[in-house]
Image (cartoon, grey):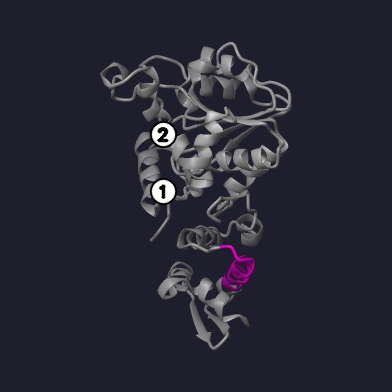
Amino acid sequence: MDVRDNQRLRCLLGNFDENILLIERELGIRIVVRENSLHVFGEEGRACRTAQLLSELLEVVAEGKPLSLEDVSYFVRQTKQDQGRLDARDILSDVLLTSDRGKKISPRTEGQKAYAEAIREYDLVFSIGPAGTGKTYLAMAMAVAALRAKSVTRLILTRPAVEAGEKLGFLPGDFQEKVDPYLRPLYDALYDMMGVDKVQRYIDRRVIEVAPLAYMRGRTLNDSFIILDEAQNTTPAQMKMFLTRMGFGSKVVVTGDVTQIDLPRGAQSGLKEARRILAGVEGISFVQLTDRDVVRHRLVQRIVLAYDRFENPSVSTSEENLSD
């Protein structure tokens, strides 16, 4: 495989050749770099799949998309499990948003790609999956992109203020100051994409609203991109109230992890109930992300898998044979 551009080759190899070393170790083949070419040696089937993977990753870096070790690790796992032909270029080159600092935000797994496509196609999308799968962050990226494109006039980001081990009454300050810690992850994502000053200006002008779910009651939200985060901690009544706030020209994304419910013992999750009631309703999409879509530190994926095995010992997880 010829690589005419040295810079592209360096990006493909990674820091200290870490990308190539990972591919060799996981796929059981040997890759030799000779001047501007890559040579793959090993069992014929593996070598062919590896050459195809290298070709796709090279197309990604040729388009100027950064290639992280986590990106390479994901596609190596899919190749190793013979998941069929995954187009790395199609997934990684789908830029949802370029932040004000020039950071390109893209899906990084097949599940995340499907999630982004669902948000484009449907007005109401439920994204359900474990921690680290990008449920909130990708929705935020698409919300900011929609605001930039003027397809919506405001962003509304909300979470239920559910106590998880701490009592609101013990926190200092007024009610808004008490609920701010629950909303902090939403602010953090906004700051990463738009910068602190711009976010604050938009908040002052009410173009962006970050508020606890209780503030949504009695409103009709038109021409808005609305994200309900941590929806597993809504009650059925809260979920129904929120979903019926949707107005004309609006898009709604609901995210949650049904394995991390902080409601009082015996209380039913509004997200679980909505999944039962609304499954199959035309115009609504449910996207299920899995441990394969975890894009945080690789230990996060292993933690998710360990808990899944502990809580559901009879259920085989998708990465049961994952190796380092």
Residue extent of the magenta highlight: 49-65
Looking at marks 1 and 2 on the same chain, the residue that comes earlier in the sequence is marked by: 2
Question: Callout 1 environment at 10 Å: few (<14), some (14 to 19), or many (20+)?
Answer: many
Where in the figure is residue 155, as x and y percent of width and height? 59, 31
Identify the residue position indicated by label 1 in the image: 301
The answer to whether residue 207 is above or below residue 30 is above
Where in the figure is residue 279, as x and y percent of width and height? 64, 25
Question: Which amino acid type is shown beneath numbered disc 1?
Answer: Gln
Determine whether label 1 and label 2 are within 8 Å by CB: no
The answer to whether residue 278 shows anywhere in this view is yes
The answer to whether residue 118 shows anywhere in this view is no
Label disc, if present, on residue 184 of the rendered structure: 2
Quadrant of the rendering where the N terminus is positioned: bottom right
Asked if the stretch drawn in magenta spans residue 53, the answer is yes
Left or right: where does residue 288 sit relative to residue 179? right
Quadrant of the rendering where the C terminus is positioned: bottom left
Q: Secondary structure at mark 1?
A: helix
Where in the figure is residue 70, as x and y percent of width and height? 46, 58
